[in-house]
Amino acid sequence: MDIDKLLDQYKNKEISKKQVKERIALLQLEELEGQARIDTMREDRIGLPEAILGDGKEPEVFIEIMKKMADKKGRSIGTRVTKKQKQLLKQKKGKYELEWYEKARIAVLKTRKHQKPKEGKIGVICAGTADIQVAEEARVTAELLGCEAHKAYDVGVAGIHRLLPVLKKYSEKNIQALIVAAGRDGSLPPVVAGITDIPVIGLPVSTGYGAGGNGEAALLSMLQSCSILTVVNIDAGFTAGAMAAKITKT
Amino acid sequence: MDIDKLLDQYKNKEISKKQVKERIALLQLEELEGQARIDTMREDRIGLPEAILGDGKEPEVFIEIMKKMADKKGRSIGTRVTKKQKQLLKQKKGKYELEWYEKARIAVLKTRKHQKPKEGKIGVICAGTADIQVAEEARVTAELLGCEAHKAYDVGVAGIHRLLPVLKKYSEKNIQALIVAAGRDGSLPPVVAGITDIPVIGLPVSTGYGAGGNGEAALLSMLQSCSILTVVNIDAGFTAGAMAAKITKT
Amino acid sequence: MDIDKLLDQYKNKEISKKQVKERIALLQLEELEGQARIDTMREDRIGLPEAILGDGKEPEVFIEIMKKMADKKGRSIGTRVTKKQKQLLKQKKGKYELEWYEKARIAVLKTRKHQKPKEGKIGVICAGTADIQVAEEARVTAELLGCEAHKAYDVGVAGIHRLLPVLKKYSEKNIQALIVAAGRDGSLPPVVAGITDIPVIGLPVSTGYGAGGNGEAALLSMLQSCSILTVVNIDAGFTAGAMAAKITKT
Amino acid sequence: MDIDKLLDQYKNKEISKKQVKERIALLQLEELEGQARIDTMREDRIGLPEAILGDGKEPEVFIEIMKKMADKKGRSIGTRVTKKQKQLLKQKKGKYELEWYEKARIAVLKTRKHQKPKEGKIGVICAGTADIQVAEEARVTAELLGCEAHKAYDVGVAGIHRLLPVLKKYSEKNIQALIVAAGRDGSLPPVVAGITDIPVIGLPVSTGYGAGGNGEAALLSMLQSCSILTVVNIDAGFTAGAMAAKITKT
Amino acid sequence: MDIDKLLDQYKNKEISKKQVKERIALLQLEELEGQARIDTMREDRIGLPEAILGDGKEPEVFIEIMKKMADKKGRSIGTRVTKKQKQLLKQKKGKYELEWYEKARIAVLKTRKHQKPKEGKIGVICAGTADIQVAEEARVTAELLGCEAHKAYDVGVAGIHRLLPVLKKYSEKNIQALIVAAGRDGSLPPVVAGITDIPVIGLPVSTGYGAGGNGEAALLSMLQSCSILTVVNIDAGFTAGAMAAKITKT
Amino acid sequence: MDIDKLLDQYKNKEISKKQVKERIALLQLEELEGQARIDTMREDRIGLPEAILGDGKEPEVFIEIMKKMADKKGRSIGTRVTKKQKQLLKQKKGKYELEWYEKARIAVLKTRKHQKPKEGKIGVICAGTADIQVAEEARVTAELLGCEAHKAYDVGVAGIHRLLPVLKKYSEKNIQALIVAAGRDGSLPPVVAGITDIPVIGLPVSTGYGAGGNGEAALLSMLQSCSILTVVNIDAGFTAGAMAAKITKT
Amino acid sequence: MDIDKLLDQYKNKEISKKQVKERIALLQLEELEGQARIDTMREDRIGLPEAILGDGKEPEVFIEIMKKMADKKGRSIGTRVTKKQKQLLKQKKGKYELEWYEKARIAVLKTRKHQKPKEGKIGVICAGTADIQVAEEARVTAELLGCEAHKAYDVGVAGIHRLLPVLKKYSEKNIQALIVAAGRDGSLPPVVAGITDIPVIGLPVSTGYGAGGNGEAALLSMLQSCSILTVVNIDAGFTAGAMAAKITKT
Amino acid sequence: MDIDKLLDQYKNKEISKKQVKERIALLQLEELEGQARIDTMREDRIGLPEAILGDGKEPEVFIEIMKKMADKKGRSIGTRVTKKQKQLLKQKKGKYELEWYEKARIAVLKTRKHQKPKEGKIGVICAGTADIQVAEEARVTAELLGCEAHKAYDVGVAGIHRLLPVLKKYSEKNIQALIVAAGRDGSLPPVVAGITDIPVIGLPVSTGYGAGGNGEAALLSMLQSCSILTVVNIDAGFTAGAMAAKITKT
């Protein structure tokens, strides 16, 4: 290591005290690379790569980034993958193994097996057809991060009676974190968090129209909830799934 | 009534046909007093005077308007009456009879008895202490407009089980319109409207803080509701109560 | 019923008191299915199914949901049905009977006749061509829910004189609820509610451009109205129509 | 005037041509004093000084600015003058003549008489007590700028019949510009502009509460009006009055 | 007139007093057609028809409305006419005469000559290429309403020196109203209104991107102007032009 | 407990099977008292009572609610307690034991000892003096719910070097959930979540002024974070603390 | 120059003093051409032409403006040039020399060489692929304005360790201004400005979705920054680059 | 200094090489005190301490922080200091030297002389009395950071002619950065940046009322400016002043 040599030179009077000090100052600013290494190890250890947002990227660019990340981490996760991106990915997957999750619009490129035992248990709840895509993005994300991820997609505030058996089942299964997706009025997460002990993550979905549409009413409603819950951004299924997975590992 | 007298005079030849016509033209085109009178008759019949908003008015000005309206209509209704306005009203009520509704902050000045049989039945529901003032403004308004107005103020989404017995009771009583007041996340009205057949008016209350506070999340949430409900402005207890009363009279 | 058997077993000492209690607790949480049944009966009774929003759904998915709902309820109502959805629906309606309302963009799929006597009477008013689609969505909805639904689509604030004869006619016909649709400045509903006794539902329409465009000014203007009216979300024709129908049944 | 003297000196050969040119260049590019003077003359001619906004200024500062402006222009106009400012102004008016307009909260300090014949005619309309202060600010401003300024403060959309006789009277008086002040839903200006030929300036007032309160709904509603009208900012009575005065002078 | 006959019948005892009163009440509510007639005459007299907004309407529907209005008023004005609408209009203009204003995107359908002497004079100013379309919509509108309408489209705040000669020229021509169109920062109208005596109408244009884009910053900036000006909605060229024309006729 | 007694009576043949069933049906459908009881048991078990928001309540009302809740649950937690409320609480605490947390503005009223072993471990981080009150509300809440709650209040993005040692220490202590409070630009939570494995709850604080002030920028910034974190409402210290405690118990 | 002639004529008594004064007044108000000329010289000197925004303009119009500007200034800069515009520009560049910057979407048309020595040094930093286009627009702009413009596009808050070496390098190179582009949470510019002495310009990018998406959170976050930085509008790469270039020339 | 002593001890063989290395590692990785020191040195060198925002802090707390910072840095700068804070600061300044800037509301506490030669030159421009406080905050800040800071506070868009001589003077003085403060419509900074070569920092001020009030219109207008300028948050005088100072030192 440099510092050894530096001190030797200083002792041998090859360099002055001022030079030692300058050199150490450089190390302080520059060689925080040690910290960088720790960072990389952390990512490998918990398997929490950044998601690569497909929507809005040119298919070629998207695939290039997916492959680069897969090379670096052994696996890359693409979210909100468009039809065109999916097709091109299938055509040009080359040496990589491709996993495709249709409803969640998630693509996974892998260079090697990811044999992860199911460590944690999470549950995803949503009210109806409009919220399923985002809910699935959350659920699949949690699964990819090593969770057993349950779902119940036919529950709604308008039919509150369908909710209780689900929560009972989740409670019996020792679910550790609950993602509740809801668009429009966003009433479901506050109701769920008012009934269950399991930590609830509210996931607003960009449904609805008019005032408060595109998930805005749902987001505000969840932020204002009297019941205890935390919230992610509108349509942020990946964040919700990854946070749920993190909670199961604490 | 003028028109009677006019026609009598015409018949008795005290005035000419031209004079009758001129007088009627005046009524129609210039003064439109006829329409005004019809308007007045309508207000007397359904007892739906404008509310006089107390909050923000100087006490003296407020009382002067209250008295003028009471003179014209036999009764005036002041809403969001401040403490100072209430005190001055008590001191200076003069020949008028004063009714005071503490929680609703409503003051009524009357010149004559308003003996109205209870014609319709409405119910008011809210979740807790923070919403009671506005809920009471709605309930008392409906009562002043001739309704039997029930209340249930200890119901909340977090304790959904307290809601069902209330709705069952209201259904048995043949309540014709339901006002559901809610602040913060505004989840209660969508939940109620998803369960009951009674028409629901959502009444957002200006509680809550941070993003979506002051009733904004509640309003948007109600506008986005999948269940069928209509909405009034934030804290518009008088409007909600008056609309509920109107519904019972259809 | 289980509870009988349970109590027999307890009496016969086949199970302990603790076991009885546990079993009852399960019934409380789990078997609220009785309530669910009541709920289903309610929907059949008042004929108020959820609307299936066409706009934004893939045609195949939309039709699949329409059919599933029609199987369950005997009838399904699709709103904001796009041209593509309409065409596919016509091609693939199979065993179902299809009703199509062109201006309202509403499709109805039926498995059996819905012979409903016209029970209530509602009226729909709007100012001009831009608001007709949403107004028709409201009117047809009310009709589908068993109302006689009148319309007057040539009334505007700029020509206030066209409004009075309409209100007079509606008053004579004993209309029980009035839907007033308006875009841009949304002035019509406050004006109407200031003249008539019939309960008014304001229906903001997403016309207009610039500041307050897309129905925002209309919505806020209606919420701020001094006259008594309640409001639904921008373009929420189905909600307005269904609420009007509910009011006629109180 | 400098330029006179300059040319005299040049003619008298006291200064060279180059010196004249330099001096003129200075006038143009550096000082642009000529333009400044023209500017001053313009203000004197049309009597349109800047208003000095009282509200928010420390009384001493406010009075100091009022006096400085009065010295420069012969007259200064203070708007939204607070009670404290008014009192101090009365105590310390010194050599200046003070005019005070109670309802409009306008103070005028003068060093000399402003004998201006009434040149134009404008009218101000508002719906009720809540809008009078701002309406008066507009009306008094127009008066101070030399207009005959009429008012009608008991007109509202809810009682549309009170509006027609006012407009008829204004039309007969050849009113050249109309200011229509309205808070809450702001429906009055579109209605007025839909009936009359007189140019209408919409003046939103910061009344109302909840969504769209503080004049926001009124402003947006006026901007969205189908009838022809222009708009000033919320509570901008001075601007409305000054614009109306400008219109009468075209 | 009916009223004569009515009174005759009453005098002749052919009808009762009650019948007379009922008949008069009908006249009051129903037959405000007299007022309607006045309204129509007004529109013919000042030539201020409603504009028919092309953008967003199906070409067939648009043309149908254009023709109906032309039949009723002798002329109809379509604004923001799309290319498709323009083409169809040319193909299917039938018996009507078509005027087309390319830059303003305005189409006029006429059944008869509109020989209107140029009565008033207005000027339109804008900063650059991005604002010309909306500025032209305003200018052509004023022209169609009988004004001599000048333009200066190369003036901007960044080059303030180009502005003064324009204002000087307009002043010499006795321009009576000035429309100043500006997008992005909207600085031009306040600057213009600070220099000239002519009444200024600020016309915000939906240019700009990011925060305050689409004309929002321009609108707010004009509403906040210290100089005296009134404002129309973003892109509301027709309203600005029509208001300017109204001002010239006061 | 009722159900015990009921079953005893049944066994002892004091009541019939039919009576038992009726009684149980009542519990389920009408009163749902069973569920209520379960609910109560849940609250006792996890010690998660509702917080009583002090700010905005009249001191007398606040204290009354605090006592009622303490009677029911053995302990009540008041948040954002004002100085007046604190003083009155001290004077009138009566039989209850009062705990007061100065910086967190939290008051606890107790009827009996709450001897809870420290079960979980959470950490709270904030940037500086402006955020401490809200951070303390979160920390004390977690402590009251049985957590060992650490704090580090001198960490900021501007001095990123102060952050690393804190995270290192928290990692060594096996902290299970991290609350990161930040006002103004809200940069701290994304930075922290980008470094550590511990689940991060972002807590926006209502500091800052101008655009995005009052916590709005902080909230949006956290919602947009690329790092994995969930968010609570602005200033919602209680929610953050309670959620962190919930996570430690999964 | 005119003024010479004018003074000659005056001296020779060919024109009166009044005529001289009038003529000078005209020069002051009308021509101000001197100022205009200075303005043109300024633009040539600092080489800071207006950018011509491509996006949203018809290709033909865009190219016409580009050529006109190139004729006037010797060079024109088109930003956010679309693919169609680029292609047409290549086909129809005629006598002009075309420079094309792919990532920055910038096109330069030139009539003559622009041999500008690299005068200043600026640096551009961004976090990842999503921000590169806007970052490049800024960088290329600065280069076109005569700067040596460095870039570092792989730096992000989530990996703060990659940032320090970059800043160290920039510091050693004596970079005079730093543009930091960031979308979503916009955390990078505050972090950078908290570490370095170089003036930082925050450049928000319209990435992100949901609440605060499209660059809004990034903009607000930068405005709220505790570290010292200034901000340009969302996606305003040209402004950022030009400002950085201006700073290097102070 | 520690590192000196450390190296001395090492040279004198009082400590081993391993001990030196451990000690240095501690500095780098654990404590990062080295970086903190560098950071401190940076702050001393450019004299850019954090400002301590007075407004909103309890006077005692404010003074305590001021003193702590002064102890650490030799000087502390308090901004937006309230009257109460100023008074208490005067009473309790103890051993510190207090500088007070009345208009800027800035307080400086010093333990030792700050004899800084005036290194850079900046200018501050604003339109009138309402903006002076914030403009002064910027100017005094730049002065405290070692700049010669000029001011011109009587310049406004409405009187554009007062602006040119100021810019000419600033240009002659080689001002390196210009802060232009403006409230309401914020037109001044775009106008200034369109004329001068000096880099302009727009400083929006929270004046104005109604729509776009409190500095919002000013901020958006500056962000949308076609001229080249960067912007700080509303009322962020300190940031503007510090950024200007930074620019002069590049």
Image (tube, coloured by chain):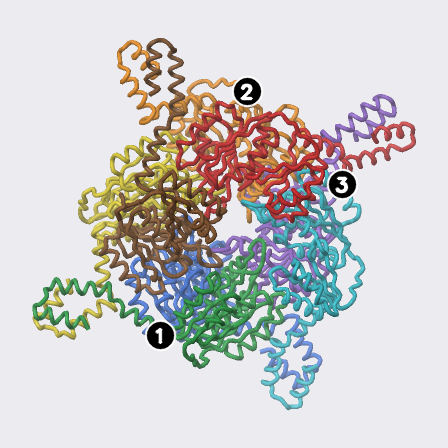
Chain colours: A brown, B blue, C green, D purple, E cyan, F yellow, G red, H orange
Q: CA distance from mark 3 to mark 2?
A: 43 Å
Q: CA distance from mark 1 to mark 3?
A: 77 Å
Residues beneath discs 3 and 2 located on the same chain: no
Q: Hey, what amino acid is under mark 2?
A: Lys
The single residue placed furthest to the front in the displayed view is A95
Please give left or right for residue F222 compared with residue D80 in the image. left
Q: Check disc 3 and report the residue beneath it.
A: E165
- Residue H111 location (% of width, % of height): 42, 20
- Residue G101 location (% of width, % of height): 58, 37
Q: Check disc 2 and report the residue beneath it.
A: H118
Frontmost residue, E36 versus F119? F119
Please give left or right for residue B177 compared with residue C216 in the image. left
Q: Hey, what amino acid is under mark 1?
A: Asn
Q: Secondary structure at mark 3?
A: helix
Q: Check disc 1 and report the residue beneath it.
A: B174
- Residue B217 location (% of width, % of height): 42, 54
Q: Which mark is residue A208?
A: none
Chain where mark 2 sits: H
Please give left or right for residue E58 compared with residue G216 in the image. right
The residue drawn where x is 34% and y is 9% is A12
Name the image quarter holding the N terminus of chain A: top left
